[in-house]
Amino acid sequence: MSLFSFNQSVRAGAALLAPALLACGAVHAQAPGPQQETVHFGTYENDSFFDTDRFYTNGVQLSIKRSRDQRGEFARTLARRACAWLDCDDSILLTSQTNYGQLMYTPGNITIAAAQPEDRPWAGLLYVEHAYALLSADQRTLTTLGAQVGVTGPAALAEEAQKLIHKTLDRPAPQGWHNQVGGSLAVMASAERRTALEGLSVELPGDVQLNTAGYWRLAAGNTMTYAAGGLAIVVGKDLPAVSPPPPGIANKLARDAFGPTACMLRWLQCTGFGVIESRLMGRNIFLDGRLFHHDPKVKRRNFVIDLMVGMRLDFPDTRTASHGPWFVQFKITRRSREFRSSIPVPRHRMAAITLGTEF
């Protein structure tokens, strides 16, 4: 696709989102309120929204984002050394974020107790990660540095979590967790650089903006090793030049807000977004198993594409003296086939809901 054709497609997509942002015409000013320095939000991601129970089937994450710089000297030194390579020496710390979460992967049929060597392996991850987001002096480039550590295997508690949920909801009991990828310490470091693209960003009627950013991400570790690149489109009002990735699990290195926006009603603010991301995979413990072990595994595809669309809704009138406004975000992801097999391997869809506030 040519750049001109892509630009035309971007504008056409914006035309579909713009009416929701313009429905009430004038924007009502919000009274200033206390500014909290910490944001808490939780994300629940599952494929059951699309009536499936397979592959990447469940993820939960609690995130804590802070705007105050509380880094110690060791963290500052690591950031300086990384920025010497990533050209972010002039950047200032925008946020630091800590995530606690669990990921769960299963084959297509969870009621089979026997090993399923042609299907995706059973696997779980329990993790904690920390990330720093650094904004350039011209506010057009966002660099994010992150590190994750966790455990796989029985210690990840994926079996207990899925069995409890299925029992509570009266759904079929999973039978094959004894075949899961074994226990190990799982580590991963990552760096992402996101830059505003002026040529693909436009002003729309009614003070609505369409901002486009290009980004790349590198991750290395025994959990995953990959290189990714993508385009992110954000539609809203009063947007920053480069919008951080929306909160959630698929993009863990995330900030919580795009900026003040308005649509439809005085008490409702909204922002729409769309992302296309391609990844060149070098390693994925959930498909390849552990290094130097005889874990269940399948033939991994080296090239994976994600298409994501979503909307975030903020409720400014819910701000109080003790906490900031509440927000809710909805996101849908469509992922290309991740592995090859003699049995049919469908594309995968999952949806996520994120809820949070500042306090």
Image: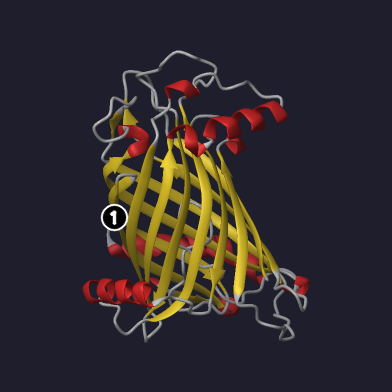
Asked whether the viewer can see residue 350, the reply is yes
- Report the residue marked by disc 1: 1
Residue neighbourhood size for the residue with mark 1, other residues' Cα within 10 Å, grouped as few (<14), some (14–19), many (≥20): few
- Is 350 situated above or below 71? above
Q: How is the image coloured?
A: secondary structure
Q: Residue at x 28, y 75 (%)?
A: 83
- Is 99 situated above or below 106? below
Which of 248/308 is in front? 248
- Is 128 situated above or below 80? above
Quadrant of image for the C terminus: bottom right
Location of residue 4 in the rendering, given as x and y in whole percent from the top left corner = 31, 65
Location of residue 164 in the rendering, given as x and y in whole percent from the top left corner = 65, 31
**Total label count?**
1
Quarter of the rendering containing residue 120: top left
Q: Residue at x 49, y 24 (%)?
A: 177
Quarter of the rendering containing residue 230: bottom left
Location of residue 137 in the rendering, given as x and y in whole percent from the top left corner = 37, 86
Q: What element does badge 1 sit on?
A: loop
Which of 69/260 is in front? 69
**Kind of residue at disc 1:** Met
